[in-house]
Amino acid sequence: MMSQIKIFISYCHKNEDEAKRVDEFLIANNIKATIDSRDLGYTKDIKDFMRTIKDHDFTLMLISDAYLKSGNCIFEILQVMNQEEYQNKILPIVLDDARIYNPIESIDYTIYWNDQYKALESKAEGIDSIAVIPIFTELQKWKYAFYEIAKFIDTLKYMKNLSYRHLLHNGYIELLGRIDKPSPKALQQIKPTLPK
């Protein structure tokens, strides 16, 4: 018997409605979906939770402007990028406000993380390093974000992506096909609804 496919849903809380909708669809199609709103217990460590990405077959990423500017989402991106051939394990769904295709716009994400890094570094300057160890840990993460965000966006740019609208409009057919999970019965029951 084939084991159940496991998908980690990576999203920014600003896009919680979209993430919930995708989660419901996956569960209805017997796909094990992991999402923080349900699977991260009260008081549990969010970083430990995000590190479980490696235990999943795929990471479905809801790419938005807010996602590419979120510290926690960056941590998840880095978890994914640390895996061998990570491009084969990501399922990017691009929301309308993500500016990833035009380099004149996408460079703003690199600038954003550089500015974040410099601002935090400047505030921490002169404070005893032992007193601000957690801040230096965060600084390290933001430094990696600055170095890696352009590489990640470049990977996305040259992949065939699905927009969130397209995903809903076509009843998730491409997504199911990509994970080798055809489900004609479930597809017939779906009534695609475009977001307002």
Image (spheres, helix red, strand yellow):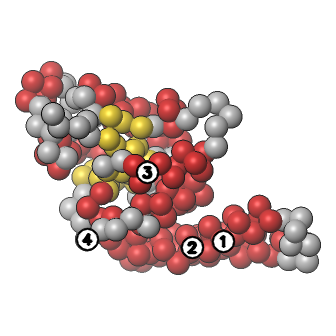
Asked which secondary structure carries label 3, the reply is helix
x and y percentages locating residue 111 in the rendered image: 57, 75
Q: Nearer the viewer, residue 193 or 127?
A: 127
Q: Residue at x 34, y 43 (%)?
A: 7
Q: Which residue is mark 1?
A: 140
The residue lying furthest to the top in this view is 189
Say which amino acid is labelled 3. Ile
Q: How far, Cα to Cα, is label 3 from label 2?
A: 18 Å
Residue 129 x, y percent position in the rendering: 86, 72
Specify the amino acid type for callout 1.
Answer: Gln
Q: Earlier in the sequence, mark 4 or mark 2?
A: 2
**Relative to 10, residue 109 above or below:** below
Query: Tag 1's secondary structure?
Result: helix
Check if mark 4's residue and mark 1's residue have beta carbons within 8 Å: no
Residue type (three-letter) at the residue carrying disc 4: Tyr
Which is closer to the viewer, label 3 or label 1? 3
Closer to the chain start, of discs 3 and 2, is: 3
Q: Is residue 30 above or below residue 113?
A: above
In the rendered structure, which amino acid carries the disc numbered 2?
Tyr
- Tell whether label 1 touches label 3 (CB within 8 Å): no
Q: Nearer the viewer, mark 4 or mark 3?
A: 3
Marks 4/1: CA–CA distance: 28 Å
Kindly identify which numbered label has been placed on residue 144. 2
Residue occupying image coordinates x 71% and y 76%: 118
| Furthest residue in direction left, as rendered | 184
- Residue 53 is marked as 3
Mark 4–mark 2 Cα distance, whole angstroms, equals: 22 Å
Q: Position of residue 56 (x, y in %)?
A: 36, 47
Q: Which residue is mark 4?
A: 158
Distance Cα–Cα, label 3 vs label 1: 20 Å
- In the rendered structure, the answer to whether residue 5 lies left or right of residue 109 reads left
